[in-house]
Structure formats: C-alpha cells, structure tokens
Image (spheres, rainbow, N blue to C red):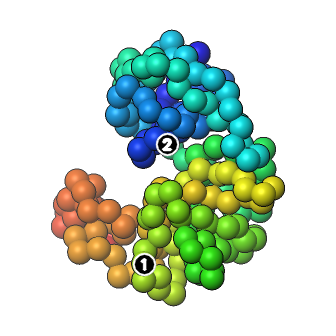
Amino acid sequence: TPLTTIYQNGSYLYVKDNEDTYGLVYGTVADTFANGDYINDAIASWTLYGDNKQMTPNGQSFTKAGHGDPIAPELLPIEEIMTDMVHRYLAVENVTITAEEAEFTYMMTDETGTLKLFDKNFKVVPENLTDGLYYVEGFLTTHNHEMELLPILVRSMTPPYPKGDVNGDYEVNITDVNCLIQVILGKRPA
C-alpha cells in the first residue's frame, strides 16, 4: 500500500499507510526520507521484536515517490496512551521528566499519569534536565509488556524562551518576524 514516512533515523523508519496504520520499518532502505515523503510499491517482511510487530525491507523497494503533507503527532494526555498504539506518532505536553538509575531511561509525568521515556535509540533528552515542564514527541513501543515512548523531540515549555522567540513557541523562525510586525502595528499584544 502507499506509505507516508514520518521519521527516519539510521535504520529506523516510521511510516503510516492510507488507513492510518502506523508501522516501523527496521533495516536498510534505498533513500533518506523526510516527514511527508511517499513510498509506493514497497516490499517487506513482517517480523517480531519482543512484543512489537515491524517490517523488514526486502531489497531496495523503499524508494521516494514524491512528497506530501507532513504527518503531525497526536497530542494526548498520558492516561489515554494504550498498548494498542504501538508505533503511533504521539506527543505529550506539560510533563516533568526525571532520570532513572537505568541508563537512557526517564519517567515523564503529567497530571494524568506516568510513562517511561526510553532514549537509547535517538538520544534527544537534554543531558542537564532542569526542573520545569516539557513537550515530548515520539513513537510508542513496548518492552517486556511495558509501554515506553521513544522520543524524537524533547523541548522545554518553561521560559526563558530562546532569543528571538517572539511568539513563545520555543522556535525562532519567520512566524516570530510576523508576530513582531503585528506587535509593532499594535494588532497583537506582546
């Protein structure tokens, strides 16, 4: 079936099909993909890794066939994240993150619950965690029948904002310029 790519890091390629089924392709693929790239006529085998079903590419059939709209993560409170969401692209916000004794292992907590954050594969959790709230994007997996999120983005939600971040979205880009123009024109409060 046609696939839309979401995220690639080395041999990890997360995809979604036209029926909103998410999957992980693990192995060497022909191209490097960005969020929104299409793949048509890919050939793969199903395999199991622990509790998780994933695809192993056959040959060089995973090739880019165009680009469409990027896939956005599904923003959920922790209590709504379930084991049947494996490989789904999820986001949680306003979470605290605490390091565990096990290497690359953290716990993230919001007002609804706690979920393990396992950062071995992509190493995106800041080395010097500070007190405060965070926004996290990643892919759900299970290990030993326990849910964990493999993070691909961890961003502080606690000021100070990055220099130049006029609109407070923790990114400095053209929207900050547009926001500043609106502030100068008096059309939007600072």
Which structural element holds mark 1? Answer: loop
Of all residues, the one furthest to the top in this rendering is 41
- Label 1, residues with CA under 10 Å away: few <14, some 14-19, many ≥20: few
Circle 1 residue: 127
Above or below, comparing residue 37 to residue 154 in the picture:
above
Which disc, if any, is residue 65? none
Circle 2 residue: 12
- Label 2, residues with CA under 10 Å away: few <14, some 14-19, many ≥20: some
Closest to the observer, 119 or 173? 119
Which structural element holds mark 2? Answer: strand
Residue type at tag 2: Tyr
Q: Measuring from the top left, give residue 49's x and y in whole percent.
A: 69, 43
Q: Is residue 69 visible?
A: no
Closest to the observer, 55 or 130? 55
Q: Earlier in the sequence, mark 2 or mark 1?
A: 2
Q: Is residue 180 visible?
A: yes
Q: Determine the residue positioned at 59% across, 25% down.
A: 17
Residue type at tag 1: Glu
Q: Quadrant of the C terminus?
A: bottom left
Q: In 3D space, how far apart are the residues under numbered discs 2 and 1 (Cα atoms)?
A: 23 Å
Closest to the observer, 160 or 121? 121
Looking at the image, residue 12 sits to the left or right of residue 150; the answer is left
Looking at the image, residue 11 sits to the left or right of residue 32; the answer is right
Above or below, comparing residue 39 to residue 124 in the picture:
above
